[in-house]
């Protein structure tokens, strides 16, 4: 028998004394069939074990019992000198006896409102469900995959002979952060982000490790899954990399002699061009999960310095943005870009998934330069921080 949502309390942040009950709910929904306890399962998505995890949770309660919850957190990111803010959503779960009542949708709406209050620009949700789509989240493109294996690794011919390559440990957290902080497109991460991934050796539900690469004073790293056996061969996925691209290429060359590497490359990163130049095929793919845009106009204004670095001053000095009723508009003087529909807007800003087409976009004159030179907006790799 369905119950009216008014019978429940929340959404609200759980109290400390309710933390164990929240963990038990998440364990029952996500991990009980594979892991002996909550910690064992949650450690495969370690960002949910952050110090502030409970404070970054919203839950609905039946009396004093949590029956639905969502975990979130936020990170600032730098995109070619512009600071934007990205929110993450995960651990979306409802007790089986309470599904179909709109509890999770209520929490998700509260979560998106909190992101709006916190000036978040993009929200990455770990999954693709109708509920997420109703909140504006869509699968997006803007990413490529390159497969390097023992058969084609000879094409790479790296210019740098790797002096050292090793698995990073907890004592390397500061070095990893230092390497990453030089990237032009990156998150502003606390050191604890690296420490928690190094400690639990997992992200996005997969066992992984940081691989440090060094040559004299130059350094780089790869964040990759550990080797996994599949159909008689071993596979590894490179989720993220940072540092000297020649060193990264050398590390790929080194690792691919013994295992197949699936290297994820964001946007037009130079590593992708380096791999293409030696004949490694680029395959367009989706980013993980789904992504929502919180406030089209506000985010585009934040990115004005990025646009100004790629566009004529005559265009950007009068550039402005607005949206309403699923119409999204950018204009300058007598030129205009109009996008109808949430899906087309998200794909215009972040890239359409493979085999999808953006429609209902009207663009005139010099506004085409905005689309051609600045869009889709490049985002940093998401996996390490997903929940």
Image: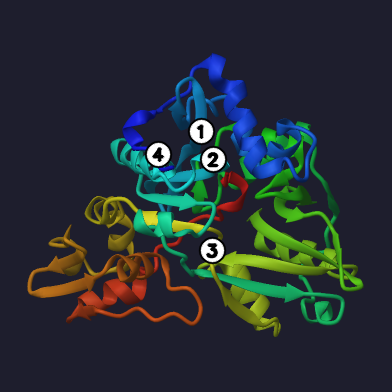
As displayed, is residue 89 above or below residue 350?
above
Crowd around label 1: few <14 · some 14–19 · many ≥20 (10 Å): many
Separation of marks 1 and 3 at Cα, in angstroms: 30 Å
Instruction: Identify the residue at image location x=75%, y=45%.
Output: 33
Q: Is residue 216 left or right of residue 124?
A: right
- Give the labeled residue for mark 2: 97
Q: Which of marks 1 and 2 is nearer the N terminus?
A: 1
Percent coordinates x, y for residue 180 in the rendering:
60, 46
Q: Could you say which is closer to the camera, residue 211 or residue 285? A: 285
- Give the labeled residue for mark 1: 67
Q: Could you say which is closer to the camera, residue 10 or residue 241? A: 10
Q: Mark 2: which secondary structure?
A: helix
- Give the labeled residue for mark 4: 107
Instruction: Specify the quadrant of the image occupied by residue 324.
Output: bottom left
Q: Earlier in the sequence, mark 4 or mark 2?
A: 2
As displayed, is residue 384 above or below residue 251?
above
As displayed, is residue 99 above or below residue 224?
above
Q: Earlier in the sequence, mark 4 or mark 3?
A: 4
Q: Which of marks 2 and 3 is nearer the N terminus?
A: 2
Q: In this view, does 22 lie to the left or right of 210?
A: left
Q: Nearer the viewer, mark 2 or mark 3?
A: 2
Q: Mark 3: which secondary structure?
A: loop
Residue 287: give its label. Answer: 3
């Amino acid at each position: 028998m369905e119950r009216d949502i008014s019978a429940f309390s929340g959404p609200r942040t759980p109290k400390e004394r309710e933390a164990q009950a929240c963990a038990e709910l998440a364990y029952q929904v996500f991990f009980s069939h594979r892991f002996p306890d909550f910690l064992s399962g949650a450690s495969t998505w370690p960002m949910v074990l952050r110090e502030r995890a409970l404070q970054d949770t919203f839950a609905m309660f039946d009396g004093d019992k949590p029956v639905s919850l969502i975990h979130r957190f936020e990170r600032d990111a730098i995109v070619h000198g512009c600071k934007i803010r990205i929110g993450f959503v995960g651990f979306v779960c409802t007790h089986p006896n309470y599904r179909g009542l709109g509890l999770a949708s209520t929490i998700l709406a509260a979560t998106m409102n909190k992101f709006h209050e916190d000036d978040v620009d993009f929200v990455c949700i770990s999954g693709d469900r109708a509920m997420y789509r109703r909140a504006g989240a869509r699968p997006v493109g803007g990413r490529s995959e390159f497969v390097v294996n023992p058969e084609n690794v000879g094409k790479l011919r790296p210019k740098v002979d790797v002096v050292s390559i090793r698995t990073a440990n907890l004592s390397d957290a500061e070095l990893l952060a230092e390497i990453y902080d030089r990237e032009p497109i990156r998150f502003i991460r606390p050191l604890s982000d690296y420490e928690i991934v190094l400690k639990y050796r997992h992200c996005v539900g997969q066992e992984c490790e940081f691989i440090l690469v060094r040559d004299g004073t130059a350094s780089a790293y790869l964040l990759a899954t550990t080797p996994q056996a599949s159909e008689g061969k071993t596979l590894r996925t490179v989720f993220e990399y940072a540092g000297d691209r020649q060193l990264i290429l050398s590390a790929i060359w080194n690792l691919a002699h013994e295992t197949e590497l699936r290297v994820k490359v964001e946007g037009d990163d130079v590593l992708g061009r380096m791999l293409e130049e030696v004949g490694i095929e680029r395959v367009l793919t989706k980013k993980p999960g789904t992504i929502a845009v919180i406030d089209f106009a506000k985010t585009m204004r934040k990115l004005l310095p990025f646009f100004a670095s790629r566009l004529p001053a005559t265009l950007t000095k009068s550039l402005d943005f607005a949206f309403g009723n699923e119409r999204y508009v950018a204009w300058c003087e007598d030129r205009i870009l109009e996008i109808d529909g949430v899906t087309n807007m998200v794909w215009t800003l972040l890239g359409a998934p493979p085999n999808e087409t953006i429609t209902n976009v009207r663009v005139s004159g010099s506004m085409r330069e905005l689309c051609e030179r600045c869009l889709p907006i490049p985002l940093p790799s998401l996996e390490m921080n997903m929940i």
